[in-house]
Image (spheres, helix red, strand yellow):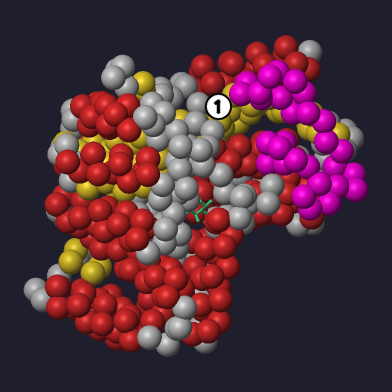
Amino acid sequence: SAPVQYLDALSSEDGASRAIELFRDTFGAEPDGVWSAPGRVNLIGEHTDYNAGLCLPIALPHRTFVALSARGDDTVRLVSSIGDGGVTTVDLGGLAARGVHGWAAYPAGVAWALRENGFDGVRGFDAAFVSCVPVGGGLSSSAAMTCSTALALDDVYGLGFGNSDEGRVTLIGAAMKAENDMAGASTGGLDQNASMRCTPGHAILLDCRPELDAFHSVTQQPFDLEALGLELLVLDTQAAHQLNDGQYETRRGMCEDAARLLGVKNIRVVADEISHSVGLDRAVTASGGICAHDFENVVESADAALAEVLGRLSDETMKRRVRHVVTEIWRVPQFVAAFSAGDVKMAGELFNASHDSLAADYEVTVPELDVAVDTARRNGAYGARMTGGGFGGSIIALVDKGQGRRVAQSIADGFAAHGFRAPRALAAVASDSARREA
Ligand code: GAF
């Protein structure tokens, strides 16, 4: 088949100048500034965020840039390089949840959410978006848009949250509210935290327990692929991905039902209780690696204890959903420990186990994702898995440095043979969170 296409990231200069140009052409004025926010890939910890679990995302070099100006009224005017160049207008006055449709719900929803959260000083704005985060690729194009908007509004309306990690948590709240209540995507916080809190060269270990403050919810974990002679291939399968079509919400609802039936406030409690009772938590520490000599026995005991808990549920589908969430939460610290100890084989196996669980137990994969993962594994990847919400979107594969393009091509060839759309590849290095560009 044809050579696999790589999606390059826009440089800061390019992204900013294109956004300024679109703003000028559309609104006939200079913007107050340009801000940007990245897409993400989650290394492991999928469908755990809304279960108060653990995730491990990095920010992509691929970003959404917004040139934006404050207005003195309640009008929002939006234009995007991805659209047809037309301007969408929204009136913030009297706006209610689900009151905006299409992509405008995301940026307009952020201003609406900030006002709903009590920041009355936030008024209308003009904004021009330019992005290199593939839309619908499961790489958080939505969060890149809401987070770049939140940071811009914070700046032009002088809220003062953008300059600290703690303050950013407030902006994340508004970005999430925009997605949940305006766009109707009941997402859980992984994407917005990644876009707002990641730092170059690091993944964030994100602990989604709602009781944690900013200081305790994120720890920066060095993620240096170079040092291990590795490369992380990201491949957008181009199988359409959408989070507001009911499937995501159904998964989320079933997890909440399961927690109620088990008498716990969330599934994280189940994962932690078992982990503690069998010593899994003591065997796996981020600083000490995986230290139990009898690690396999510990994992077996954990699985047995989990089976016992699942025995208290009667619905077979629900059992599998809970099993995915609990085992996935366990895999996150194991991956951190394996990676920091340079145990590439184990890190890859954890990728594989995560994908297999998402496919068999959580049922959020599609044939394109399974074929891509399978092809990557057969072509030398240490491990491969879908990343993000699933139902389409992207995979990631841990491969030897210099092998990414070959593996991507083998997947593209496989896709051609299956009659799938041509996939697109991205080179992933752990990049910076949302920032002001100009
Ligand atoms: C999507 C959601 F937006 C996230 O909140 C998260 O649940 C993810 O799917 C699955 O881990 O990206």
Q: Is residue 100 magenta?
A: yes
- On the picture, is 408 further left or further right than 30? left
| Occupied quadrant, residue 299 | bottom left
> Compared with residue 266, is residue 235 higher up or lower down, i.e. above or below?
above
Please provide the residue range marked out in magenta: 78-106
Residue 282 visible from this viewpoint: no
Find residue 356 and report its horizontal and vertical position in percent. 30, 57
Name which quarter of the figure residue 285 lies in: bottom left
Q: Give me the residue at 46% from left, 73% from top.
A: 318
Q: Please provide percent x and percent y for residue 35.
A: 60, 31
Count of marks, rendered view: 1
Q: What is the residue that sits farthest to the left in this orientation?
A: 293
> Element type at marker 1?
strand
> Was residue 31 drawn as part of the magenta stretch in this picture?
no
Q: Residue at x 37, y 40 (%)?
A: 368
Q: Which residue is pictured at 75% across the width and 40% down the height?
A: 101
Q: Which residue is mark 1?
A: 131
- 253 relative position to 96: left or right: left
Residue 161 in percent (x, y) is at: 64, 48
- Which secondary structure type mostly characterizes the magenta part of the structure? loop
> Image point 18% across, 66% down: which residue?
290
Where, by quadrant of the figure, is residue 333 drawn? Answer: bottom left
Q: Is residue 221 above or below residue 298?
A: above
Q: Is residue 358 visible?
A: yes
- Residue 248 or 397: which is nearer the viewer? 248
